[in-house]
Structures are given as structure tokens and as C-alpha cells.
Amino acid sequence: MAYNVAVDVGGTFTDVIVFDEGAGELTEGKVLSTPDDPSVGVVTGVESVCGKLGISFGDLNLFFHGTTVVTNMILTNTGARVGLLTTRGHEQILHLARAWTPGPLYGWMALVKPDPPADPTDTVGISGRLDAKGNVVRELDEEEVRSAARRLVESGVESLAIGFLNSYVNPEHERRAREVVREAYPDLPVSISADIGQEYGEYERTLTTVVNTAARPRTTLYMRNFETSIKEREFAGSLSIVRSDGGAMSTEAVAERPIQIALSGPSGGVTGAAYLARTIGVPDVLTFDMGGTSTDVSLVLGGEVPVRRDIRLGYFGFKAPAVDVHSVGAGGGSVAFLSASGALQVGPASAGADPGPAAYGRGGEEPTVTDANVVLHRLPPGMKLGGTLGLDEEAARTAVGKIAGSLDLSVEAAAEAILDIVNENMYAALRVVSVERGHDPRRFGLVAFGGAGPMHGNALGRLVGSKLVVLPPKPGVMSAFGFLSSDIQNEFPETYLRIAENTPASDLKGRVEALVLSADGWLEGEGVDRDKREFDLYADCRYYLQNIQVPCRFELDELEGEDATCLRERFEEAHEQRYGFRLPDSQLEIATIRVIGRGTVRGVSLVEGGENGGPDAKEAPDRTERVYFGGEWLDTPVYSREKLRPGAEIAGPAIVVQDDTTSVIEPGYSGEVDRFGNILIEEA
């Protein structure tokens, strides 16, 4: 019998989920993360869940792992000391950067510009020059490369990045420079910008290469130690690391390009929600992932995971594909306070895990969203978070009472006001990924997950006018579930910069076919069987002399005829939807072409949850509690999620409890358990 496991390492908890292919069952677990050595928490968590099932590491087939190791290195600037070889005259490229400052207005006044990730003293200009078309203007000075590498290594540099001007067109000089360095220092990690991304944009390409290079030594060590630790426990299956764009890659590939797993955690939830949405026949959904500190939202269209081509972490922006997620500082631990004007605000400050909300009984005194839910009994009296942590209602009432006294409200009214405000904050985030991008949220479903998502999902669905709210069976470990549904994946881009009206379709087709061959070769190296390889083709298009690019998907057999204008209609349709206009007299420019090579892996499948009990099944509530809704206390049934069978109908108001989360169904709404165990909430 085969078992597949996925692990999501977060800042506080490590989530583990195991899928039993034979029984079609999911078993989850949570353990505290171990920041000093994340692999310890991973192994502990997997052993814990395996113990529940009576199996060992040797019984595991597929292992998917998402990690924040690279994210933390970038945010804390704790990667390796990296040297940079660049074109002579461009040594200050990382320091010049882009003219960008963070908001709000006048944010530049408080901005302390961080040091570049490669120190100027570790940056060396090398003679050699290519023009904009990739022609050699001046040959590479190999002796300068040798001398620079020797000086940098002797000064203590631990890895080396190479980024020359116009190398995205012709990587010849970068590849030769790498060979020269490796001849002298075969064990020194070396990255070249042409391998990280063959796209124009000298600053972004160089920055991405430097950050990737800085992360390589520690990432390689982590991957090696992690593989060793699980092999010592007799794991003999296939190990994959989850990428920022929702795909997966081998540990060897990650060691070469760690930048591609910088946002692996948030990608899992969106990937899992997209897979779930496709399975239940609701391919257009908004995803709502609410945790303790922040909420991540995204939009899934046609069942496809949305991917952007840049990442921003802290001050810096990088060129790497990632799931398009918008985050807001709103979560269960978000602190409520009164502004200088006396207005009630919630977040982005959070009580975190230590001391946490007042209701945790660990010394927290500030009122939080969790405390408000406890006061209103949305978290019912007597329940334990995660099955172990009891809640102190009196402490929660005392904390929320600070707000109530200042606003001359009852404790219950103040708690409801806190929830209303945090819900509005998250509603604004959902509008960013829907309304502001030309989509009507009323025609989308809403998939709510995360530790606090199902508690607020009904309210958010009501605010956006969503036609359906979906609460997955295991909402608290949705990211780990998404890892199980990931494909082996990589992206192969190339700058094109051609006018569609003047470009023969055969020329575009030939360039795309070359990228398909590169993607196919990579999948071969990842061990993907030929019949499981798929290729998605995209062209990033824009109006000529504009810089607003729109990705357009196409197929090879469409590239026929005298020119490449077959892309124009889908570009203009997408452009008009998002920006509200077309420019019919402007030519179309194809800026970048890209091929995404995917190897399909079946790590999980949604299985129907047994016999349909029907709406009259006896899913009686465990008890009835008084819960506060709309300014009054209402008698509200409390159900155990594990007892609800397919077909069960739950009239609101109702509370559904389970180990990893609590779900709220508001008055005027009803929930029905579908054949996969999801609770589908609609207006009654």
C-alpha cells in the first residue's frame, strides 16, 4: 500500500499530511517548527503522523517539501558572502537599483536603503562587451576573470555570481567565465545570469543571480542533510521540493536555483485550492488563506494557478516565477487598537505565538481577533485549539473590554466591531485580486482555508457577494495538501522583442520549439516519464512602445500564416478586461516567450467520503451554545466535523469544530457537505 507525504514548514508550526492511496484518506499533524534546523521538525512531524497510521518512513512513496529556508535568508540577509563579476563600467548596478520607495506617501523620508546583497568591495568589473544584439564588441579578458576570482576567494567570498551586459541574448562570455573560475576553484558555487533568466532587465537579472548565489551554499547543505536524515530512516521514495509557482523540483535542481523556492509556502494553498475547485466543478474561485499573522488571497481562473514573474521580499524585487498572491496584515493574532483620532483599527501588528492572544493564557493582554471570536463564542466555550490548547474566555473579555470602555460599548459590541473591521481589511485584499483586475467576484466561488479562514469565510463570501463558499475537509493544512497536488515543473523564458505584424509565424514557432526541447531535456533529467510530460506555451505581449505586458497562452499549431498576429485578439481581450481600453491602431510587440515544462505527478486524489446520508441524516449537534450574531445572542448548534457525512445540511447559525480549525455558518445561510467532505455554504 502506497503513502504520499507533504510537509509545510512555517515560522511557528510545521504541517504534515499523509495520503493513503489505497484508502483515499488524509491524515494530518502539526508540530512546532525548529528554526535552527528545520529538518528536525520535519522528521518529528512525519514520524508523528506515521505513528498514527502504524507505518514508517520506508512505507512512504512520494515526499513533497515546502520550506521557508530561502525566504528567511533573503529577509534577514544571512546568506553566503557572494562576489560579483560584471561588465567593466557597471560595477554599481546593484547600488543604483530602481527608483522605487515603499508606501505610504512620503515613505521615502523614512526609507533606509539597504546595502546591496553583493558588497561593492566584492564586485569586480571585467573587460569584454556584447552589443544589444549579442555581437561581440570586445573579447572577454580571461586573465582578468582568473585574477578577480583569486582575489575574491582569498578575501573570503563563499560563492560567485556572474552577470554581464546583454548576456540574455548571448551567454557565451558568462559561460566561458564560469569555466575559467571552475578550472581554478571547482568547489566554489558559481551562478550565471543567463541560466537564472534569459530576459532583458540588467538590474533585475543581476540582482536575482546574486541572491540565488548567496542562498546556494546553505540551501545545498540543508538539502543534503535533509536527504540524509530521511534516508537514515529508510525512506526510498521520490523527494520533491515545492517551487514558488506551485510546481516541484528535485533537490539537485533546488541546489542550483534556490531562488525558485523563495515563496514555496504560500503557493501550496493556492495550488491545493485550484485542484479542489477543478475537482468539484467550480473552476473560478477566490482563495482566502487566513492564518495567525496575515491573510493571503489569490484568484484562480479556469482552474489554473495564477503565476507572476517577479517576487518582492523586503526591499528587493527578483525575477522568478511565483504564484500571484496578495497579502494583508490581518490574522487571528491581529491586535485591535484605537488610533490617535479615536478610530478603531485592527492590525497589522500581531500578538504572534508568544505571548499570543489573551485567550491563550500565556500573558497576552492586547485584544486580538481571536479574543473577539472567543468573546462572541464563535470559538465555543470548552473547545481546545489543535485539540490541546484551552481558551480563557475571561482573559479575552478583559482584553476586549479595554476597547469597549474607550468606545462606550458593550464587550460583545466591541468584539463584533473588531471582527467587522478585520473582515473589511480582508475584503479589500480580495478586491485587489478581483475587481481591480477586471473580474466580478460575484461569479466566483470562495475557498476559505488556513487556521482562521473557515471562521471568517462566510462573512467574506457575504461581503464580496460570492456565489458559493467552500470549506475544505482539512483547512488548516491546505498548503501541505496543495504540495501533494503539485507537478514537477520549470519555466524556460527567452526575450523576443519582435513586432507581431512583422514577424513570420514560422520564426516564432521555431524559437518556441527550441524552448520546448530545453524543457523536455530538463524533465528528462528530473526523471519524468515521457508520457507524463506536458508543455504550456506563453507569450508576454504589449502594445508597441508601452510597458504593460499581458501573458497570452497559445498552442504550436496556431503559429501558421505570414505573421504572428494570432496572439492579438486574446491580448486585447485581456488588456481591456484589466485596464478598460484597447489601442487598435498600435502594433503588438511580443516581449518574451516562455515554455513551462510540467511532469504530472499524482500525489493525492480527492475521494468521495462514503455513503450519502442525505439531508435527513441524523447528524445531530454535539451541543448548543449561545453565540453572538448581529447584536444578539442566538442558540447555536455546535457540530463535530468528523461526524458530518456527505449530504448533511446545516442551517445557520451553526459552528463546526475540528482539530485544525473552526467553521462558522452565519444566520441566513446554510451549509451542505458534498461527496468529498467539503462544506458548501450558500445563502438560504
Image: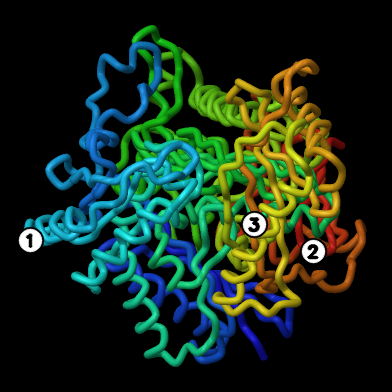
- Are the residues flagged by discs 3 and 1 in contact, CB closer than 8 Å? no
Q: Is residue 355 visible?
A: no
Q: Nearer the viewer, residue 596 or 190?
A: 190
| Circle nearer the N terminus (1, 2) | 1
Residue 596's disc number: 3
Q: Count the marks: how many? A: 3
As helix, strand or loop, the secondary structure at mark 3 comes to: strand
Quadrant of the snapshot with the N terminus:
bottom right
What is the crowding at mark 3: few (fewer than 14 residues within 10 Å), some, or many (at least 20)? some
Residue name at image x 45 percent, y 33 percent: 329
Quadrant of the frame with the C terminus: top right
Q: Quadrant of residue 463?
A: top right
User: Residue 677 location, x and y as percent?
Assistant: 77, 62
- Does residue 156 appear anywhere in the picture? yes
| Marks 2,3: beta carbons within 8 A | no
Q: Which residue lies under the disc numbered 2?
A: 676
* Residue type pointed to by label 2: Phe
In this rendering, position of residue 426 left or right of residue 167: right
At which x and y percent is residue 355? 30, 46
- Label 2 to label 3, Cα distance in Å? 31 Å
Q: Which residue is mark 1?
A: 154
Query: Residue at point 67% right, 30% down?
Result: 589
Q: CA distance from mark 1 to mark 2?
A: 60 Å
Q: Is residue 398 above or below residue 452?
A: above
Residue kind at label 1, given as amino acid type: Glu
**Residue 627 image position (x, y, % from top left):** 64, 38
The residue nearer to you, when weighing 281 against 396, is: 281
Q: Residues within 10 Å of mark 1 (few under 14, many from 20)?
A: few
